[in-house]
Image (cartoon, rainbow, N blue to C red):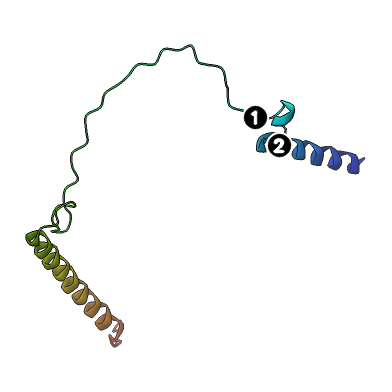
Amino acid sequence: MAKWIIGIIIVVLLGAALWYSGALSSLGLGMSASQTPTSTAQMATTTQQAAAPQPENGMAATNDASDAAITQDTAAVDAQMQGLTSDSANVDSSLNDKQTAQSY
């Protein structure tokens, strides 16, 4: 009796997988997109254009390729690299920290 139940479950799962994958669509049995035109009216909507993204981390505008913008971007990258160097030095010093005696 258990073999019959397991067999039915396998057949149902296999049929569901074939239906979901669309393999049965050639027989007109699978999932398919509706091909009939919709009768609901569609209204055009307008949205406000999003504000241009602001430069981040001291960088110049994203579409500015002038010499001044490149100089500003270079200076911003240099400042960020100096901050990274400082952070790296702090991490190194914390890893090399010596254990101190605790008094209870």
Residue situated in front as seen by the camera: 85 or 5: 85
**Res 29 → quadrant:** top right
Q: Earlier in the sequence, mark 1 or mark 2?
A: 2
Does residue 51 lie above or below 88 as drawn? Answer: above
Query: Who's the residue at 58% across and 26% down the image?
Result: 33
Percent coordinates x, y for residue 71 in the rendering: 9, 65
Does residue 88 lie above or below 64 as drawn? Answer: below
* Quadrant containing the C terminus in the rendered view: bottom left
Label 1: how many Cα within 10 Å (few below 14, some 14–19, many 20+):
some
Q: With 22 as the anchor, is 38 left or right in this view?
A: left
**Res 16 → quadrant:** top right
Query: Who's the residue at 62% across and 28% down the image?
Result: 32
Q: Are marks 1 and 2 in contact (CB under 8 Å)?
A: no
Percent coordinates x, y for residue 18 in the rendering: 72, 37
Does residue 45 lie above or below 50 as drawn? Answer: above
Amino acid type of the residue that numbered disc 2 sits on in the rendered structure: Ala
Number of the label disc, if any, that sits on residue 31: 1
Percent coordinates x, y for residue 7 in the rendering: 86, 41
Amino acid type of the residue that numbered disc 1 sits on in the rendered structure: Met
Label 2: how many Cα within 10 Å (few below 14, some 14–19, many 20+):
some
In this view, which residue lies farthest toward the right? 1
Assign a secondary structure to mark 2: loop
Number of the label disc, if any, that sits on residue 23: 2
Q: With 67 as the anchor, is 103 left or right in this view?
A: right
